[in-house]
Amino acid sequence: MQNDYELIKEYQNGDRSAFDKIVRNHLSNTIGFFFTITRDRMAAEDLAQDVFFKLYKNLKKFRFQSSFSTFLYRANLNTANNWLTRNKWKNLLRLDQAPDRGERDTTVEDEWYRKELWDEIARLPKKQRSVVIMRISNELPYKEISEITGMTESSAKVNYHHALKTLKEKLKYD
């Protein structure tokens, strides 16, 4: 199996099938990343499609200054941040709140709590939101987060700490 470096070089030299191989290698992880955030399979697939469309247009300019996985993760993170920002109005209006049918089904509560968590994550400052997304979605270590975002490792830790403090306050979690 060819590695990302070889496939990108082939794509840059005109082999369009190399891009298909890149997509096959990274599609399921990309969809999984977005599903963690959106909790909607179709939205996750749409966001992954957006990322790969942007990659298709811009991969010719890839300069190998970072690993492809870092490059792809930045694209995923930027797309997630844009999606969260774009969908804030939906989160604020709470249009999709499930009506109470009188039964005690905790799956609705659990899902609603998860939605509230992501609503609050969407309201965090961009740096904090980025660090939280990377820690929650992919359980990335601070070292990797610092490489992806360009911030220091200690700055990533501080942003995560402040984000958690804010989330605990907003969600009234002890």
Image (cartoon, grey):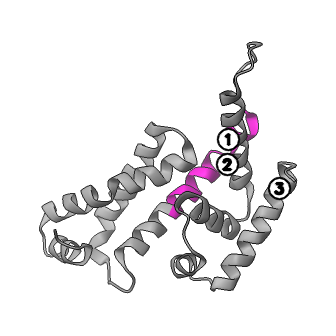
Q: Amino acid at mark 3?
A: Lys
Judge whether residue 172 can be spotted in this image. Answer: yes
Judge whether residue 50 can be spotted in this image. Answer: no
Magenta region, mostly helix, strand or loop?
helix
Q: Say which element carries label 3.
A: helix
Pair 3/2: label in front = 3
Q: Do the residues bearing badges 1 and 3 touch, measured as CB atoms within 8 Å?
A: no
Q: Amino acid at mark 2?
A: Trp
Task: State the residue at coordinates (34%, 64%).
Answer: 55
Indicate the position of residue 38 as horizontal and vertical percent values: 55, 44
Q: Do the residues bearing badges 1 and 2 touch, measured as CB atoms within 8 Å?
A: yes
Residue span colored magenta:
77-95
Q: Which mark is residue 115?
A: 1
Q: Looking at the picture, does residue 154 appear above or below residue 118? A: below
* Neighbourhood count class around disc 3 (C-alpha, 10 Å): few under 14, some 14–19, many 20 upward: some
Q: Which mark is residue 12?
A: none
Q: Amino acid at mark 1?
A: Lys
- Residue 9 on the magenta segment: no
Q: Which residue is mark 3?
A: 168
Indicate the position of residue 75 as horizontal and vertical percent values: 45, 65
* Neighbourhood count class around disc 2 (C-alpha, 10 Å): few under 14, some 14–19, many 20 upward: many
Q: Which mark is residue 118?
A: 2
Mark 3 and mark 2: Cα distance apart in space: 13 Å
Indicate the position of residue 97 as horizontal and vertical percent values: 71, 27
Task: State the residue at coordinates (57%, 74%).
Answer: 141
Rendering quarter of residue 131: bottom right
